[in-house]
Amino acid sequence: MPDSPVPAEPASLLALQAHPAAPGPGGLSIRAGVQIVDGAAEPGWWLHYLVEGLVGTLAVPVPQTPGPADGLWRHTCFEAFVQDGDGPGYREFNFSPSGQWAVYRFAAERERVADDTPPAIGPSIEVQTTTDALQLRAWIPRALLPAAPGRVGLTAVLETTGGPLSYWALRHPHADRPDFHHPAGRSLAPA
């Protein structure tokens, strides 16, 4: 975790929209935001995700030892896709309420960098739950971000108990299927 205190939430959280082909149950809403921390002993980004409503219907992964894990998107998971400058490269970050995470580097859309391996030190995740809200905050140290971070796609996959997955994003580039990797999904310019 950074030396700076955890902010309660960024100034504004933006609403994520469920994909119409996989909307999941009603009664849930998700908002997300990015808060850039510069000038601190450890610069980086705080990502905030807030699920409100019928959170008791969610299948939330149980706590695990924090560390890298693949396939987190198969269950409730919060994600960020950060473009590398104006180019085709980007990073994918997955944050599970279990405390596990994944960081992937891509040279272009769905084209993983050949020598991509999990970093030695990854993001940190904090989760708070109440009867009507689930909040996940993830700290990404600056060293894990692209050299010149560009536009960002904030996304989430929600699994409900006994139900299908639903896919949430600031922007869905395809009407027929969820696709978080499409460049048009990276619509947020963090300030």
Image (spheres, rainbow, N blue to C red):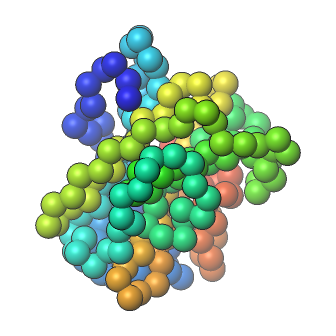
Q: Quadrant of the N terminus?
A: top left
**Residue at 21% of width from left, 58% of height from top?**
129
**Residue at 54% of width from left, 71% of height from top?**
74
Q: Position of residue 63 (x, y in %)?
A: 36, 58
Q: Quadrant of the C terminus?
A: top left
Q: Is 145 placed above or below 39 here? A: below
Location of residue 73 by image quarter: bottom right
Extreme-right residue of the structure: 114
Location of residue 107 by image quarter: top right
Q: Position of residue 165 (x, y in %)?
A: 47, 78
Location of residue 134 by image quarter: bottom left
Is residue 98 visible in this depiction of the protein? Answer: yes
3 or 171, nearer to the observer: 3
Q: Is 166 placed above or below 126 here? A: below
Left or right position of 122 against 78: right
134 or 108, nearer to the observer: 134
Count of numbered badges drawn on the protein: 0
**Residue at 16% of width from left, 66% of height from top?**
132
Q: Position of residue 31 (x, y in %)?
A: 33, 55
**Residue at 16% of width from left, 60% of height from top?**
130
153 or 66, nearer to the observer: 66
Q: Is 150 placed above or below 101 here? A: above
Q: Position of residue 96 (x, y in %)?
A: 44, 56
Is residue 190 visible in this depiction of the protein? Answer: no
